[in-house]
């Protein structure tokens, strides 16, 4: 098997995060076509796809406070509502991929993840490994999860992908497709490279997240990616825009291209 890629389609890319359950259906269709084209160009390319919840799960999650914990009957009803919202968007993503003849199959974290105090402790890896071996495209997403300390919580797509890496999958790249061209400095220019050594120089430029987001904005994303590359030094992360047609295709075919921001341990 050639190098494994993890791809995340950000919630801000595939939904309008300032709305409520507002999917960008045209963007989703184009991204699915670009994934199909990349798989055709690289037939042996193993890929795991994750997507954010955007204006679906984040809105419901913020309303119910699900990430902080779930204990009362009302909170458990909210837990179920957040799960349903996340799955509604997941279904749209999978259907767009299937319409582009990509054999996509959904793997919901709520059915495969266990947490303790907001941290994933176990994740079911074998089904995803079997899907990859069969040539399928596993699709996961931000979701609710049962938690031994909090009752229930929310896990982000990045946290799920980190758990998959920790459980044994070893991606060479984590590609984060969003609506921005990368991480911007204070002058609005894309920062080409970020490492632990250069983080203090760019930290002031890392703001929050537009729209509802219960899992943190760019600052927490960059820090979590640095933590991940420290844990897996052979992993590189690229943050780039999926709004520009053709960029996702090019990035899947040549992940070491210069588009966007690269985050590495060294």
Image: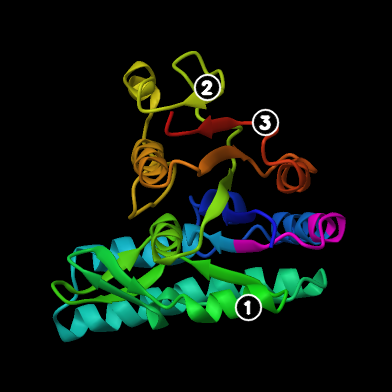
Given contact means CB atoms under 8 Å apart, are the residues at marks 1 and 2 in contact? no
Given contact means CB atoms under 8 Å apart, are the residues at marks 2 and 3 in contact? no
Mark 1 or 3, which is nearer the eye?
A: 1
Q: Is residue 47 magenta?
A: yes
- Which image quadrant is residue 201 in? top left
Give the residue pinned by disc 1: 131
Marks 1/2: CA–CA distance: 36 Å
- Residue 133 in view in this figure: yes
| Mark 1 or mark 3: whose residue is earlier in sequence | 1
- Which image quadrant is residue 158 in? bottom left
Residue at disc 2, secondary structure? loop
Marks 2/3: CA–CA distance: 10 Å
Residue that appears at 21% across and 78% down: 75
Give the residue pinned by disc 3: 259
- Point out residue 74 in the picture as x, y percentages from the top left corner: 20, 82
Residue stretch in magenta: 37-48
Q: Is residue 133 above or below residue 187?
A: below
């Amino acid at each position: 098997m050639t190098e494994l890629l993890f791809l995340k389609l950000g919630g801000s890319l595939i939904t309008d995060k300032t709305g409520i359950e507002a999917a960008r259906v045209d963007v989703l269709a184009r991204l699915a076509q670009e994934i199909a084209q990349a798989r055709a160009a690289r037939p042996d390319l193993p890929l795991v796809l994750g997507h954010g919840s955007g204006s679906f799960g984040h809105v419901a999650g913020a309303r119910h406070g699900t990430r902080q914990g779930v204990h009362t009957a009302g909170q458990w009803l909210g837990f179920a509502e957040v799960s349903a919202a996340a799955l509604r968007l997941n279904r749209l993503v999978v259907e767009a991929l299937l319409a582009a003849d990509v054999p996509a199959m959904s793997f919901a974290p709520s059915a495969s993840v266990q947490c303790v105090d907001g941290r994933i402790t176990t994740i079911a890896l074998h089904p995803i490994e079997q899907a990859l071996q069969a040539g399928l495209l596993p699709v996961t997403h931000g979701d609710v999860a049962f938690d031994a300390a909090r009752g229930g919580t929310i896990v982000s797509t990045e946290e799920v992908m980190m758990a998959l890496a920790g459980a044994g999958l070893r991606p060479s790249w984590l590609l984060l497709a969003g609506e921005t061209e990368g991480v911007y400095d204070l002058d609005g220019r894309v920062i080409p490279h970020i490492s632990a050594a250069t983080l203090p120089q760019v930290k002031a430029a890392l703001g929050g997240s537009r729209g509802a987001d219960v899992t943190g904005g760019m600052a927490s994303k960059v820090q979590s990616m640095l933590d991940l590359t420290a844990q897996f030094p052979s992993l590189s992360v690229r943050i780039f825009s999926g709004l520009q047609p053709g960029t996702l295709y090019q990035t899947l075919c040549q992940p070491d291209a210069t588009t966007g921001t690269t985050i590495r341990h060294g």
